[in-house]
Amino acid sequence: MAAFSATHCRSYSYSHSSSINGGQNQRFSFSSFSRLSVPAKAIRNSHQTVVLMQDGVVATKVTPVEKETPKEKLKDELLSVTSTNEWDEKAGFDSSENESTVSITVVGASGDLAKKKIFPALFALYYEDCLPKHFSIYGYARSKMTDAELRNMVSKTLTCRIDKRENCSEKMDQFLKRCFYHSGQYDSEENFAQLDKKLKKHEGGRVSNRLFYLSIPPNIFIEAVKCASSSASSGNGWTRVIVEKPFGRDSESSAVLTKSLKQYLTEDQIFRIDHYLGKELVENLSVLRFANLIFEPLWSRRYIRNVQIIFSEGFGTEGRGGYFDNYGIIRDIMQNHLLQILALFAMETPVSLDAEDIRNEKVKVLRSMRPLRLEDVVIGQYKSHSKGGVTYPSYTDDKTVPKDSLTPTFAAAALFIDNARWDGVPFLMKAGKALHNKGAEIRVQFRHVPGNLYNRNFGTDLDRATNELVIRVQPDEAIFLKINNKVPGLGMRLDRSNLNLHYAARYSKEIPDAYERLLLDAIEGERRLFIRSDELDAAWALFTPVLKELEEKKIIPESYPYGSRGPVGAHYLAARYNVRWGDLDIEQ
C-alpha cells in the first residue's frame, strides 16, 4: 500500500480504457506518473524495430531496406541517441503525446464530505508528492460559484502534516491553482459536455485519465454516471468513478443500483468506497496475521473463543438526522464498515496480494456466514439525559427526525461463520451513537488455558485470566496483547499486563487519513480496498432478511441514556454466547 513520504510514492503498472463505456485496454507503466515509458514494447515501422527500455534507453534492430526517404533517414539518425527526451527534442516531436494527465472531478463539491474529507485528502497527496506531474481538480455542483470562490472554500479546510510543515503555504497556493469549478445539473448531458471542454483544455493533448468522485445522494448516482458516460468520458485514457455509500438499502435496491451502473460502466471502472478499509489499522490486519508466525496458528476456533468488532460515537445526530433516519445504524455502519473488517479478519490466506485474490477470499467468508436472525440482534435508540448540569437531547428531539421514529441508533448482533476455521465462534459486533466514548476496535478473546496451574490465583473469574488481542482502529491507534504476568515481589501475585504497540509513541509521522489512501488507490487502479459487486451482494444477503423483519414487525428499539454504554439488551445477547463485552473492562 501507500508509502507516504516526502519524495517517494507508489508506482504501478495499470491499464486505462479508451472510454467510460469500456473499449480496448492498453497497458502502460507509469513511473511517478510524470512520464510514460513502455517497457520492452516494440514500436515497428517498415524497416526497423525500436525498443524502449525501462530506463529510457533506445535500442534498435535495423533491417536492410532498399530505399529510405529523408524522413526515415532522420529517424535513423535520431535512434542513435540515448534517451527518449533527446529523441523528442531532436525530432521536434511534442513530448506531451508521451505523457499522461489525471483530471479529478468531485461531483457534489459544495457538500460537507467534499469540503471536509475529499479536498483535504487530495491536498495531502499533493503535499506528499503522490499526485502525478500533470493533474487538475474540478469541483462540480449545482451551486453558482467561481474558481476563486471554490479555492477560498477549499483553503479553509486544508492542513499540512503535523510532522512536516515546511513550505506549507507555498504548497497550498500551488495546489489551489490547480482547482477549478464548473456549475451544472447532475442530470444534464449539456453541462457535462461543457465540463468536458474545460477538462480537455487543461489536459493539453496528453493521454487523458479521468476520475469522478460521486459525493452526492444515491438517488442521483445513475443520472450523473449516465451524463459523464455520454459527455465527459476520456477519449484516449481510463475513466473511473468512485461511488460513495450507501449502496442501496437492501438486496433488491442494491442489485438495481449495480445493474443501472453497469449500463454505463464496467465493473473495473466502479470503485465502491468504504473509507474504513483505508484505516491504517484495518490495512494492518493482514500484515499482523500473515507476516507474523505467532498469530496465524492461533487464528481459528481452536484457540479463539470470540471476536468483537465495536464502533461507538460520543455524539448523536444533532440536526443531521434526516439522512440517518432513512438508513439507521445497521445500514450505516454494520452492513458495510464492520462487516468488511470481519471479512478481512476471518478470510483464508489469499493466493497473492492481488486485488482479486483478496476480494475472492472475502467473498468466501461472507457466503459462509449464516443469515442474521432477529433473536441475535438487539436495537436501541438514545433518549434525553442530564449530566453535570447539561441536558443532552434524545434522538427524536432532532427536528429533522419524525417524532414517532423507530430507527435504531444502536445495534448489537451475533454472527457465525460456518466453515472449518470458525465453526461455533461467535463474532459479536455492536455500533451506536451517543455512547460514553468515541472509538472503533477489534477485540480477540482467546480461550482459557486448559488445566491452568494458576486458576486459584485468579479466583472464580476466569475471564480475568483470558488473553486478549486488541486492535484499536481509532482514535489513538494501537495494538496491544493482554497477557498474565507475575507482579514483582516475594509473593505469587498475578496481574494482566499489556504488550503495547502504541502508534503515536512508536512512529513519529502522522498517520494518513483513510481517504488519502483510497483516492491514491483509485488513481492508480488498485482495487484491493474497494468493494466488488458480488461482495456487496453477499453482504446484503446477510442483513436484508432481519432488516425487513424489524421494519415489518415495527420492533420498538430499547431506550438508552445519551452518553451511556448502550441498552442492557446488548449485555444479555453477549451473555447468551458466554461473552462479556471487552470495552466494559476498567483496564482500558
Image: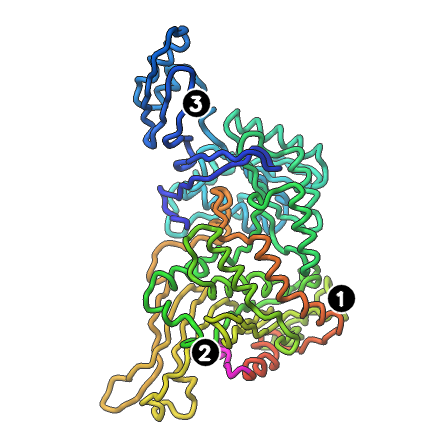
Q: Closer to the N terminus: mark 1 or mark 2? A: 2
Q: Residue 460: percent from the left, percent from the top?
A: 42, 92
Q: Residue 253's image quarter?
A: bottom right
- Provide the residue designation for mark 1: 402
Write down the region rendered in magenta: 577-586
- Provide the residue designation for mark 3: 95
Q: Closer to the N terminus: mark 1 or mark 3? A: 3
Q: How many marks?
A: 3
**Residue at figure coordinates x 34%, y 84% from the top left:** 495
Position of the C terminus, as image quadrant, is bottom left
565 sits left or right of 357 in the view: right
177 sits left or right of 536 in the view: left
- Circle 1 crowding by C-alpha within 10 Å: few under 14, some 14–19, many from 20: some
Can residue 386 be seen in this snapshot? no
Q: Residue 309: percent from the left, percent from the top?
A: 51, 70
Q: Residue 128: percent from the left, percent from the top?
A: 41, 44
For the residues carrying marks 1 and 2, which lies nearer the camera in this image? 2
Q: Which mark is residue 305?
A: 2
Give me the C-alpha separation between circle 1 and circle 2.
41 Å
**Residue at figure coordinates x 45%, y 80% from the top left:** 586
Label 1: state its secondary structure: loop
Instruction: Identify residue type, mark 3.
Output: Ser
Q: Residue 377's image quarter?
A: bottom right
Instruction: Identify residue type, mark 1.
Output: Pro
Give me the C-alpha separation between circle 1 and circle 3.
61 Å
Q: Residue 153: percent from the left, percent from the top?
A: 58, 43
Give me the C-alpha separation between circle 3 and circle 2.
61 Å
Between 494 and 232, the one nearer to me in the picture: 232
Q: From what the image shows, is residue 59 above or below residue 476?
A: above
